[in-house]
Structures are given as structure tokens and as C-alpha cells.
Image (cartoon, grey):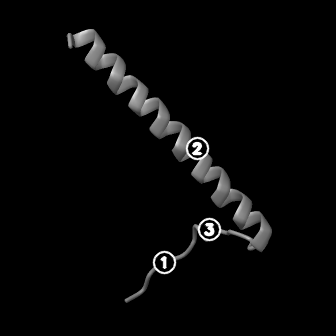
């Protein structure tokens, strides 16, 4: 196997991984919508110890 074949193989693996990751994120987003939990980030939050 030459370098080009190896690179093509790595690129293909990364493509598949990325597609699966996007599907997972989409699933999580769908579940969050179903739960209807308002997600708010309080930017003024200060952790006082």
C-alpha cells in the first residue's frame, strides 16, 4: 500500500466518523426538543466559594 492509498483510507475513516458524529448530535438535539428543556446559560454566573 502506497502513501496515497493510506491517505485515502484515513480520509474515508474520518468522513465516516464525522457523519456518525453529526447523526449523533442530531439525535441529541431531537431528544432535547422532545424533552422541551429550555437550555439557558447564565453568563453572569459567578462561582463564589
**Dot placed on the residue nearer the N-terminal end, 3 or 1:** 3
Task: Report the quarter where the N terminus lies.
Answer: top left
Quarter-of-image position of residue 11: top left
Task: Find the distance from the CA under tag 1 to the CA under tag 2.
Answer: 33 Å
Q: Position of residue 14 (x, y in %)?
A: 41, 32
Q: Helix or strand or loop: what does disc 3 sit on? A: loop
Quarter-of-image position of residue 43: bottom right
Q: Nearer the viewer, mark 1 or mark 2?
A: 2
Q: Helix or strand or loop: what does disc 1 sit on? A: loop
- Which label was assigned to residue 26? none
| Residue lying at 71% horizontally and 66% vertically, measured from the top left | 32
Cβ–Cβ under 8 Å for marks 2 and 3? no
| Residue lying at 40% horizontally and 32% vertically, measured from the top left | 13
Q: Residue furthest bottom?
A: 49
Q: Position of residue 22 (x, y in %)?
A: 58, 44
> Can you say whether 18 is above or below 29 in the image?
above
Q: Nearer the viewer, mark 2 or mark 3?
A: 2
**Dot placed on the residue nearer the N-terminal end, 2 or 3:** 2
> Can you say whether 24 is above or below 48 in the image?
above
| Residue lying at 42% horizontally and 86% vertically, measured from the top left | 48
Q: Nearer the viewer, mark 3 or mark 1?
A: 3
**Dot placed on the residue nearer the N-terminal end, 1 or 2:** 2
In the picture, measured across the screen, residue 36 lies left or right of residue 47, that is right
Q: Position of residue 19 (x, y in %)?
A: 55, 38
Is 8 in front, or is 42? 8
> Where does label 3 land, which residue?
41
- Which label was assigned to residue 46? 1
| Residue lying at 67% horizontally and 69% vertically, measured from the top left | 40
> Where does label 2 land, which residue?
22
Q: Helix or strand or loop: what does disc 2 sit on? A: helix
Amino acid at each position: 500500500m502506497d502513501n496515497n492509498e493510506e491517505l485515502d483510507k484515513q480520509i474515508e475513516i474520518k468522513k465516516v466518523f464525522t457523519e456518525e458524529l453529526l447523526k449523533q448530535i442530531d439525535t441529541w438535539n431531537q431528544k432535547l426538543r422532545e424533552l422541551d428543556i429550555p437550555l439557558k446559560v447564565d453568563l453572569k454566573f459567578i462561582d463564589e466559594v
